[in-house]
Amino acid sequence: MLPDRPVDNAPYYSLSHGGLTVEGWSRAAVQSYWRIPELKIGFDLGAQPWDFMGTPTWFVSHTHLDHVAALPVYVARRRMMKMEPPTVYVPTEGLEDVKKLMMIMHRLDRGRQLAHLKGLTAGDEIELSREHLVTVFNTTHTIPSRGFVVWERRNKLKDEFVGLPGDKIRDLKLSGTPITREVRIPIVAYTGDTSPAGLDACPACFEAKILITEMSFIRASHRRDKIHKFGHMHLDDFVERAPRFKNELIIAAHFSTRYHPNEVRKLLDNKLPADLKAKMHLWV
């Protein structure tokens, strides 16, 4: 037990970058869970650290157990602590079954599973605040799965008004003329589990300040065609795409349990190009 975590029921790392904190942990077929405290959102609920209970909004990438099993636990804990019901987004294809799961847990636990459950399809946009929103894209996995991009929104003066005196801009604004346009900046991208096709289909993943993604396999002996078929990525997929990653920080996780952490660190240290290695953090 760590001194700053009086209830330390699930491991997680923490890293701050650009005014945002990423907390979480992920191992293939074990459990995945992440949160961004400043945005009050989380991604996936394969387990639920006690410290994450106060996060009110969650985006579940897909319904494999290592990504969703702790959903009833999280909801029950919030009810027990007299917190407001959370909002949980899941792929639309699994929404009704997730609702059934919650009803079954209600019967077994004798406690109401109070949560706002909502389905998501590619192209959906979810308002987090006036400054931030989340967009949804399809990833490629063995079951329906979604990835998420968090955008910062800024209002920028329209090009045709740039250079005008302040009083002219003021008069235009008072007359009801729209003088600004919305500019979106991708600040966090989360892929969940996906083959490279899911990553490639979302250009914002390569542009977001922070990318949280999977690298399930690393050994040269593991066939990439088979890995891709089962909706995962290999170290070589990242090496091939190295010039495309414009991110400031990449968190790679979800490594197969067949790898010892030392093997992961050593192999990636030897194989990743220098520019990609400098921005990649391995959570293993």
Image (cartoon, helix red, strand yellow):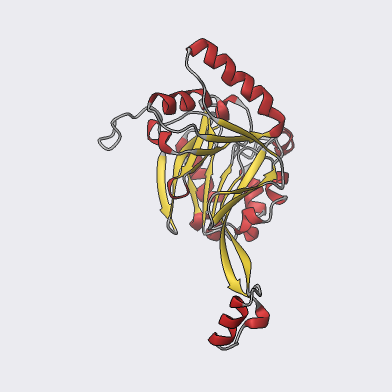
Q: Answer above or below: position of 239 versus 283.
A: below
- 20 or 56, which lies in front? 56
Residue drawn 42% across and 33% down?
53
Residue 124, given in percent of the width and then of the height, sits at: 69, 46
Q: Answer above or below: position of 125 versus 62.
A: below
Where, by quadrant of the figure, is residue 95 drawn? top right
Residue 281, given in percent of the width and then of the height, sits at: 48, 49
Q: In the picture, which quadrant includes the N terminus? A: top left
Residue drawn 48% across and 28% down?
47
- 179 or 35, which lies in front? 179
Whether residue 142 is visible here, answered yes or no, is: no
Residue 177, given in percent of the width and then of the height, sits at: 66, 75
Q: State the count of labels.
A: 0
Q: Residue furthest left?
A: 3
Residue drawn 60% across and 19% down?
101
Whether residue 244 is visible here, answered yes or no, is: yes
Residue drawn 69% across and 52% down?
202
- 238 or 101, which lies in front? 101
- 149 or 88, which lies in front? 88
Q: 93 left or right of 191?
A: right
Residue 16, given in percent of the width and then of the height, sits at: 41, 52
Q: 9 left or right of 159?
A: left
